[in-house]
Amino acid sequence: MLDDPQIPVRKPLLDLTLVEDDACRVRTRPFDLVRHDCVIDGYQAVGLTPEQAGPVVERIRRDRPDPGFPISLRTGWDPQGMDPGRIAEELAAFTEAGIQHIVSAPWRKDIDDWLRSMDQLADLVL
């Protein structure tokens, strides 16, 4: 057993705290997550299209207009199995809709293919 582990700690991009009790139920809809009696530091959508993202961002921003309340989106972008042009178009559309951060999870099963997808994705979007 380690008495004093020396593990570097990196602060996450989002300090996301979800509280579930009688006063504040964690739900899947964004307007339930941004109530002022809840402790929520950000919102991450999953699997939305660019067309669906706009109304979600608009609804969240009505209650949380501060850009310091980050809105992110998880995608399944995978340049080995998708048209790279589509990824670029979706990135532009999500950005225009107000999505501030995008997390991608390529659907590769083996680590070498997954890393190759991430490298290709970085070349496309950074």
Image (cartoon, rainbow, N blue to C red):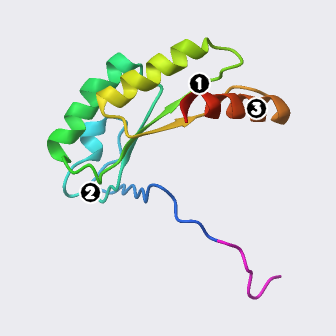
Name the one closer to the observer, 20 or 99. Answer: 99
Quarter of the view holding residue 117: top right
3 vs 2, front mark? 3
Mark closest to the chain's N terminus, 3 or 2: 2
User: Of the residues under marks 3 and 1, which one precedes in the sequence?
Assistant: 1
Residue 114: numbered disc: 3
What's the residue type where badge 2 is placed? Answer: Cys
- What secondary structure predominates along the stretch shown in magenta? loop
Spatial CA distance of label 2 from label 1 is: 32 Å
How crowded is the residue under tag 1: few (<14 C-alpha within 10 Å), some, or many (20+)?
many
Q: Earlier in the sequence, mark 2 or mark 1?
A: 2
Q: x, y (%) of residue 63?
A: 16, 45
- Magenta residues span 1-8
The kind of secondary structure element at disc 2 is loop
Rendered image: mark on residue 38: 2
Q: Is residue 121 left or right of residue 18?
A: right
Q: Quadrant of residue 126?
A: top right
Q: CA distance from mark 3 to mark 1?
A: 11 Å
Residue that mark 1 sits on: 77
Residue at 54 percent of width and 31 percent of height: 125
The quarter holding residue 38 reads: bottom left
Q: Amino acid at mark 1?
A: Trp
Q: Is residue 79 left or right of residue 104?
A: right
Check if residue 3 falls in the magenta segment: yes
- Neighbours of disc 3 within 10 Å: few (<14), some (14-19), many (20+): some
Instruction: Give the secondary structure at mark 3.
Output: helix
Q: Is residue 71 above or below residue 1?
A: above
Residue 91 % position (x, y) = 45, 25
